[in-house]
Image (cartoon, rainbow, N blue to C red):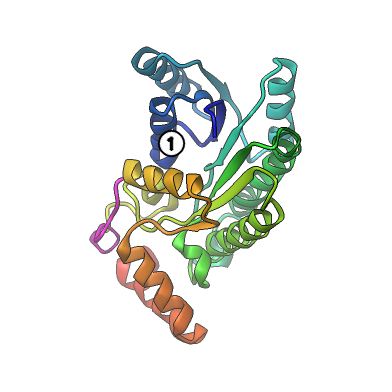
Amino acid sequence: MERGTALVTGASAGIGEAFANLLAAEGFDLILTARRAERLRVLSASLTERHGVKVSGIPADLADPAGPQRLYDELNEAGQTIDLLVNNAGFGGVGRFEALDQVRQREMIDVNVSALTRLAGLMLPGMKARARGGIINVASTAAFQAGPFMAVYYASKAYVLSFSEALSEECRGTGVTVSCLCPGVTATEFFETAGFGDLPLYRLGMMDAARVARLGYDGWRSGRAIVLPGLRNQVLVWGSRVLPRPVTRRAIRFLQEKSGAVT
């Protein structure tokens, strides 16, 4: 696909920032969105200086149900066409379901599921009309099993995986490619935000965010519906598929309790 303009959500840190750096180096102009306006400003200026591409930062809160439509309207008013959507924004929370803040968990669904779905629905018609472009939805290896003590997060990523697979098949032959990137443990702010802190158990086998983004982009370019970066993650997902579900969910429970994040 000829390079065009990419929209990256959750672009101020982690995998989203890694995608921004990668796509700028690949020659894409960029629209970056996240809640932290100052981080977006600094990143946008840096990418423009280093790669000579056009980069715009648009602060947006995708936990607000009206956020995706406002973002789309702003792009539309500016006459901006999106050729690649990287639906990366998302967050998690660890703890017993009933003990976690229920408003925060609803916001998790709004960001991880609703905003991702809405943005795909807003961008896809134009891509299909132009017969080019694509979507990379960022899920997780968590999508392949239930997750005690992260119940809503795991369920939200299972939705992203199923939704992405379906879209990938619907778009086959249209010139539009949809991929689902399913990273495992990655060196980002995710664990601190989720409430894990610095837990050695979850640092084992951690991948670099830039490597995850590169594998996700290459997988999308090659037309893969599901991209599992890293041999360790591929083995873990294979195991979750062949083992009985009671075994996998009890294993996840054991790991969560062993980590010390759940009391």
Q: Amino acid at mark 1?
A: Phe
Badge 1 density bin: few <14, some 14–19, many ≥20, Cα 10 Å? many
The percent coordinates of residue 50 (x first, y second) are: 34, 16
SS of the residue under disc 1: helix
Q: Main secondary structure of the magenta part?
A: loop
Q: Give left or right: position of 179 versus 40.
A: right
Would you name the residue on which mark 1 appears?
19
The percent coordinates of residue 65 (x first, y second) are: 72, 40
Q: Give left or right: position of 171 versus 231.
A: right
Identify the residue shown where x is 68% and y is 39%: 119
Residue toward you, 102 or 255: 255
Identify the residue shown where x is 71% and y is 32%: 130
Q: Give left or right: position of 245 versus 176.
A: left
- Residue 260, placed above or below residue 181: below
Q: Give left or right: position of 62 versus 40.
A: right
Q: Quadrant of the C terminus?
A: bottom left
Q: Is residue 256 visible?
A: no
Q: Is residue 35 visible?
A: yes
Inspect the magenta stretch and tell me whether residue 154 lies in it.
no
Q: Which residues are magenta?
A: 200-208
Residue toward you, 193 or 86: 86
Q: Quadrant of the N terminus?
A: top right
